[in-house]
Amino acid sequence: MSMIFQVIAAIIGVMAFAALFRAPRRYYLDCGITGGIGWLIYLLVMQQGFSTVIASLVATLALTILSRMLSVWRQAPVTIFLVTSIFTLVPGAGIYYTAYYLIMDQIGSAAAKGLETFKIAGAITLGILLGMGVPQKVFIVTCRWGKGLIQHFKRDSV
């Protein structure tokens, strides 16, 4: 049950972040669902026993691909979906604790937390690079196929 609440909180948080970044209102729900899916993937990978770095990489790759699909489907810039939805994966607490340990003169703890934070940031960067490396034509074809499938079901239901 906790995972469901975390995903719902991620959706709400990303929607608020989209509003803060002044994304167009019509994309708030898209951004929120994308961020919620990313957080769900992160939690599922963590549940399998992988590290936070691997979980961040997998979730970021999925977010990037989903954001690119949405950008084609909704005919909007990919940054609207990617920048807002990645909010849940950014290691803000790691940065905070690194600074905290430095201020408290706990250099060993600061170095350990700083290195972990740096690895997570690198995994996020790598996930974006890998997701952006997929040719745009793949997303165009996939989204056209998906739209055609939706229209097919709409015709059958009428």
Image (cartoon, grey):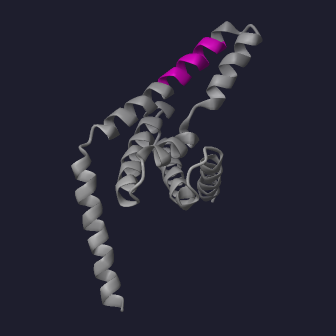
x%, y% of residue 128?
A: 39, 36
Image height check: is 85 above or below 141? above
Residue 125 in the image: state x and y as whole percent. Answer: 42, 30
- The span picked out in magenta is 109-119
**Residue at the image point whose x is 71% and y is 10% from the top:** 106
Percent coordinates x, y for residue 61 in the rendering? 38, 41
Q: In terms of image quadrants, where is residue 89?
A: top right
Q: Is 105 drawn above or below residue 64 in the view shown?
A: above
Is 142 covered by the magenta stretch? no
**Residue sitting nearer the eye, 61 or 138:** 138
Q: Residue furthest bottom?
A: 158
Identity of the residue drawn at 42% across and 48% down: 77
On the image, the x and y values in percent for residue 73 come to 36, 60
Quadrant of the snapshot with the C terminus: bottom left
Q: Is residue 43 above or below residue 157?
A: above
Name the image quarter holding residue 7: bottom right
Residue at the spot 53% in from the left edge and 48% down from the top edge: 39
Is 37 drawn above or below residue 46 in the view shown?
below
Query: Which is nearer the eye, 24 or 10?
Result: 24
Q: Residue at x 57, y 42 (%)?
A: 88
The total of numbered circles placed on residues is 0
Residue 44 vs residue 66: left or right?
right
Rendering quarter of residue 50: top left
Magenta region, main secondary structure: helix
Does the magenta-highlighted stretch encompass residue 117? yes
- Where is the N terminus found, in terms of image quarters? bottom right
Left or right position of 49 against 87: left
